[in-house]
Amino acid sequence: MRGVNPVSWRRLGQGLFFISPWILGFICLKIYPLSSSLYYSLTHYDILTAPKWTGFDNYIALTKDRLFWQSLYNTLYYAVLAVPLSIVVALALAMVLNTRIRGLAIFRTLFYMPSIVPAVAASILWLWIFDAKVGLLNLALGQVGIVGPGWLTNETWAKPALILMSLWASGSSMVIFLAGLQGIPQQYYEAASVDGAGRIRQFWHVTIPLLTPTLFFTLVTGLIGSVQYFTQAYIMTNGGPVNSTLMYALYLFNNAFRYFRMGYASAMAWILFLIVLAATLLLFRTSRRWVHYEGDVR
Amino acid sequence: MKRRDFLKHAGLLVAGAALGSGAGILSGCTTPAARPGGSKGPVDITYWHRGGGPAADVMKDLQNMFNESQSQVRVTIEMIPPEGVGINQKLLSAVSAGTPPDCAYLDRGGMLSSWAVRGALVPLDSYADADKVTEQSYYAYTWDQVRNDGKLYGLPLEANPITLLFWRKDMFEKAGLDPDKVPATMDELDVMVEKLYKKSNDNTYDVIGFVPWFKTGFMVPIGNSFGAQWYDRASQKVLGNGPNNVRALDWMASYAKKYGIETLSRTTQAFGGAGQDPFITGQVAMITGHVSTIANMKRYGPDVKYGVGMLPVPAGGRKSIYMAGESAVIPKGSKHPDEAWQFIKWLTSGEAIKKWCVSMGYFPAHTEVSKDPVFADSPEKQQVISFMEHGTTNTPMPVGDFYWTKLQEAVDFTLHSKKTAQQALDDAVRETQERLEATLKGQ
């Protein structure tokens, strides 16, 4: 604060007053649930009776819980595959849409629409697409002579099926990449072609470096979102077959609302938070090496 | 100066209005305070019923019936969405927040005892004694399921056989089998089923003879036919891995091995419901089913010739028909338990339960109502009644839904050959016992 004079106090008061709705919301809807969750993670809480303090029992019990490790593996499998793949798909679509073709706006809208279909509706739709006997996917594969697997009823293919489904909704990342692409000044491409660079070298040495901020953003938000994957697993497979699609958030949900273990579930939530925090910090640390912000002096 | 003052005063005004309307909305969100019964008007109560579609229509009629039949209590029936097995998130949150409905519909075999043990339900003994509702009023096993630790916690609605055996008489004839012969032993069943299967060329089946775990072929009903035990109340021991339990799961797994779990899953995935039910469309020749299948067949497949029977008796097993149903309870924190009792007593007896069961194709748990001829007005229904003396059920215990989930997980793993039946059931029992002991210790 600049000074201790009454004018700046009054300014502060007025400022706080004007953002008070947000502060109230933040405290009631973010700070309070967060701290309650932290408290509950240190208790046994079955929702219906008062919580009983147990210290770190829940955390220790989690390390011995095979379903905890299974669900963590399933979720990381999903995240590690779905995030990079969706970036690739979104970037490819964005590059195609970055050309001056007719009807560009229509195509952009069409590619974007899947990402705003509600998750529940999409789940029902893809349940049918993945159907082994009459689903579109296996019918298409059958046209080229491949007998498709059981997808959601097959323990090896269930997670890849879910990943495939998430690629369909790459539209939202695509729009961001499109904006990023259009923010690259044309002169760089001109300079590169003057120097004799072909399309591919231009892509690797102009487009990608200048897109790295956008890539970084999509990577971080994709990671944070994908480890919370829940709806589709809950509706489409409920964790099966043989727990191959038991996602972390689904197991958390079961513990919280089906098995009366809200404290245990809260501990799961905080462990996930720490994992994501660590991963995000790591990404930020290493980002200095590969993310080029335009205008940076190196 | 002037503008700043104006902004300040406008801001205060807006904030005040926002706070005022916010408070108004909040107070409107809580259930309206009912006038005390006995003074001017009726007491308003709410009943939460889980379900949708046809159930909602019947409930609407029942709501009107109740409200018109007397003027002390006025009920509003709200339908809440059905969730998975053992989950009733909405009711759970409401009870924990202290704003539950006055009464609610709750699964009887699994959830009621879990909730009662955690003190989430109001004991009803004093009400039942005063109104002479006793164990003679309802089928014995249903009465057992709504009691916990010697106290009464709910009133049973239905006594539904849920694992009946249905078979397509026309498909039997076509396969050269006697359409009126119920398989008497598991071996007979296995042999008959073999003749009914028809494979197609895309690694699925055009016709499935029988899949034990499909529809209502859960571990417990099938295990009961094999003479399996699940829980000993006296010692509070989980028993699900005994030799009969393992034999039952082995029998189920034999179908997975013989007909291929992959091929079967691929086929059953696309099965629909209602008019597309695979039993009606001829994709499955024999199927386990809930008693409401009879009503569904009448509605969606009236021309289908089918038979109804019990699961065959395995060697060393017993005749068993697995029964289930729901209950009406009064959650802790209910603002009008007296009036709620009046409603749930009305709902589970007399014309109310008769209408509910007739509309949904269920059987009532109330002994008097179940004698009504409408529940025996077809040969299929009469047969079902004759089966009910062999009724078996789920033993209620404090972690019933957890146990059921673990058993189904055991089935899943065994069918996919990830574990042997013994291993899978051992794991399920061990984990459930741990959970049970933790729960009894208050964790």
Image: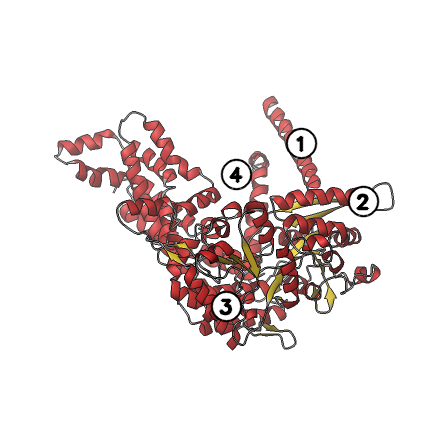
Q: What subunit carries mark 1?
A: B
Sequence-first disc among 3 and 4: 4
Badge number at residue B17? 1
- The reply to whether dot 3 and dot 4 touch (C-beta < 8 Å) is no
The percent position of residue B243, horizontal first and vertical second, equals 51, 77
Label 4 and label 2 in one chain: no
Give the amino acid type for the residue marked by disc 2 in the picture: Ser
Q: CA distance from mark 3 to mark 1?
A: 50 Å
Give the amino acid type for the residue marked by disc 3 in the picture: Ala
Camera sees residue A183 = no
Q: In this rendering, would A219 be left or right of A230?
A: left
Sequence-first disc among 1 and 2: 1
Q: Residue at 62% across / 58% down in the picture? A: A47
Q: Nearer the viewer, mark 3 or mark 4?
A: 3
Instruction: Find disc 3 in the rendering and name its residue.
Output: A61
Label 3 and label 1 in one chain: no
The percent position of residue B20, horizontal first and vertical second, equals 69, 35
- The reply to whether dot 1 and dot 4 touch (C-beta < 8 Å) is no
Q: CA distance from mark 1 to mark 2?
A: 44 Å
Instruction: Find disc 4 in the rendering and name its residue.
Output: A3
Q: Which residue is at the front of the view, B398 or A296? A: B398
- Density class for disc 2 (Cα within 10 Å; few <14, some 14-19, many ≥20) is few
Q: CA distance from mark 2 to mark 3?
A: 55 Å
Q: Secondary structure at mark 2?
A: helix
Give the amino acid type for the residue marked by disc 4 in the picture: Gly
Badge number at residue B69? 2
Q: What subunit carries mark 4?
A: A
